[in-house]
Amino acid sequence: MAPMYMCFVFACFTLVPLVTASGILVNRLPWRLTAINGFSWANCDAETLPGKIQSLTLLPDPLMIPGEITVCTILNTTVLLTAPVKIQVTAEKEVMGEWLKIPCLDNFGSCTYDDFCDILDDLIPPGQLCPEPLHTYGLPCHCPFKQGSYYLPVTSFEVPSLSIPSWFSKGNYRLKIVVSNGDQEIGCAKLTFSLAGTYI
């Protein structure tokens, strides 16, 4: 569904603290993200919900940063989505073979966003053209999202060098993203990937 695409980049780079045997330890040293490896996705609801990812391709693998990324996706929703659109993200990191839940810190991690429509309005003020490549292909970037299919053809763009807090530490991650509208669950997706980087 359209909100799932819009929140993908926002969600897959959620806050990732360093983890020790005694618990969660946040390391705030500057860290440069250099690669995203092994990206995969799945609908986590047996595709019974009204919104789903029909296809999603993210290339190359690994994605080197800085570097060129190629994206292609088809998202479907059989219902109209109006504000508020709630996004629930559960983020986990693999540590010594176990998956540990990452807490919600500074609005990143395993967080609930009560109205993603408001977030979109803050990022892209209403009345402003949607950023590329959404504008070129007529894809919306504000609520409401009409029922139907949202198709982003094969599109390439440059990802710049990213210097970020070491909350985004190297390792394996998985995200569960649940989209709901009012009391109705609209869609659910699972993303897995690995991050690589260096301290600066």
Image (spheres, grey):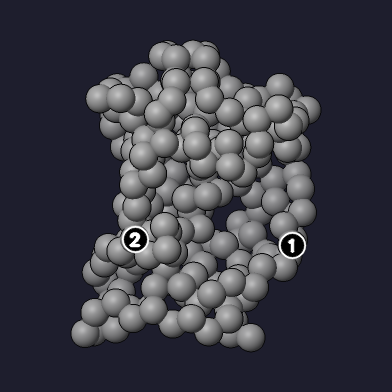
Q: Which mark is residue 104?
A: 2
Q: In this orientation, does residue 125 appear?
A: yes
- Residue 81 in the image: above or below residue 14: above
Q: Is residue 46 left or right of residue 150?
A: left
x 37%, y 35%: residue? 86
Q: Secondary structure at mark 2?
A: loop
Residue placed most toward the observer, 154 or 167: 167
Q: In this orientation, does residue 74 appear?
A: no
x 33%, y 68%: residue? 94
Query: What residue sits right under mark 1 in the picture?
Result: 160
Q: Amino acid at mark 1?
A: Pro
Q: Is residue 48 left or right of residue 87?
A: left
Measured from the top left, where is residue 151 in percent x and y? 62, 24
Q: Secondary structure at mark 1?
A: loop
Q: Which mark is residue 2?
A: none
The C terminus lies in quadrant = bottom right
Q: Residues within 10 Å of mark 2 (few under 14, many from 20)?
A: some
Residue placed most toward the observer, 61 or 138: 138
Q: CA distance from mark 2 to mark 1?
A: 26 Å
Measured from the top left, where is residue 125 in percent x and y? 66, 36
Q: Earlier in the sequence, mark 2 or mark 1?
A: 2
